[in-house]
Amino acid sequence: MTTRIVELRRGILKKNDELAAGLRASYAAAGVLVLNLVSSPGTGKTAFLEWTLRELRTHGARVAALVGDLETDNDARRLAASGAPVRQINTHGICHLDAEMIGKHLDGWEGVTLGGLDYLFIENVGNLVCPSSYDLGEKIRVALLSVTEGEDKPLKYPTMFNSADAAVITKMDIAEPCGFDRGLALRNINEIRPGMRIFETSAKMGTGMDEWLAYLEEKRGGWNG
Amino acid sequence: MHELSIVASIVDTVTESVVAYKGARVVEVRLRVGALASVVEDSLQFCFGIATEGTALEGSRLVVKTVPVVMHCAGCDADVELDGVQSFRCPRCSEPCFDLRQGRELEIEAIEIDEMNEVEETV
């Protein structure tokens, strides 16, 4: 027997990264801005996205959404009420979306082509750990947290918040009864991802949404394919 | 808990890599895991034992090397190592750092294999 060391230097998620790179190239070629929304379960991703889809459609934008969930299609049905095309991805127990699932669900999506969209939103499975490892080819990763979750969420999930491009605080309409310490939450986000854009919103009241829509438009405008 | 998916991917990659070494047995798999990679070593070890059963990796050791976070500090114009992942500020000048240079790694660095010698093979 001879012992030998074989250098591999191989990324464990290489297959996902390669698929994501392919997706990123096809999004760019189609000129569609793709956003990946991540948060804990119950943060209000669906309500926030419902509002966003409706408003963007009112402004004449062409939008669609892919929504990941372990089992039900409840979120897809809620989002479809906005009038936007929505496709459910059931992961059947898998705690994150990966690039392969996205590719499969983009193929054969009736009535939807990437070239016919301005924005594609991907609502990830509610989980702040595992989705951080899986690139979906998105241009913008949005981490959401609600005022009910505790201001230290960014410190507890630094990988997710550090890999995000924007943060959205949801349910601002109930911040006061929840005793939400706004200054502390902003400081914590800034500690983990200095300089990140932060939106303080309430989908229920429409608070902070103009700023969010302006950000989307700005990012879309700066998107040169 | 995506460690099982990660371990499954390790098993696939290593299995492919040892095909070239006829009759080789995998003794050790060495990983480099960034402090920001979101994987837990205990979970990896647990899943590794299960996922390697009946494969070329059965009975092998999993060795995990943690890679610290390194940021580029614009003020100091230097790459600086962070003490942890609770504050992304330069440990020298305390200014916020925006540019991550290291810490998200999740890779198989190398494997150690026992190869059968030619003589043994012909016997």
Image (cartoon, helix red, strand yellow):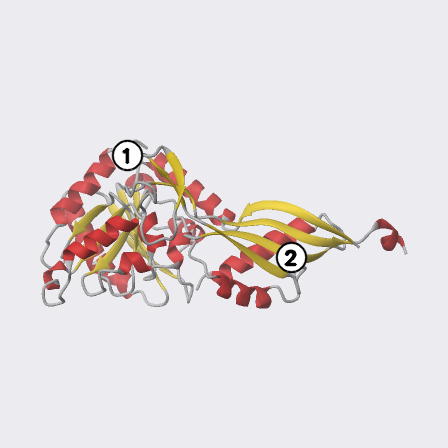
Q: Quadrant of residue B64?
A: bottom right
The answer to whether A103 appears left or right of A55 in the picture is: right
Disc 1: host chain:
A
In the rendered image, the quadrant that contains the N terminus of chain A is bottom right
Residue A216: x percent and y percent?
21, 42
Residue A154: x percent and y percent?
28, 56
Instruction: Check residue B28 in the rendering and tell me which mark sits there, or answer none.
Output: 2
Residue at which label 1 appears = A223
Cα distance between the residues tagged 1 and 2: 46 Å
* Residue A84 visible in rendering: no
The answer to which of A174 and A18 lies nearer the viewer is A174
Q: Residue furthest front?
A: B92
Residues at circles 1 and 2 in contact by the CB criterion of under 8 Å: no
Please name the amino acid that badge 2 sits on: Glu
Q: Secondary structure at mark 2?
A: strand
Residue drawn at 29 percent across, 62 percent down: A40
* Residue A150 visible in rendering: yes
The answer to which of A136 and B35 lies nearer the viewer is B35
Q: Residue furthest right?
A: B123
Q: Quadrant of residue A51?
A: bottom left
Q: Secondary structure at mark 1?
A: loop
Residue A165: x percent and y percent?
29, 45
Please name the amino acid that badge 1 sits on: Trp
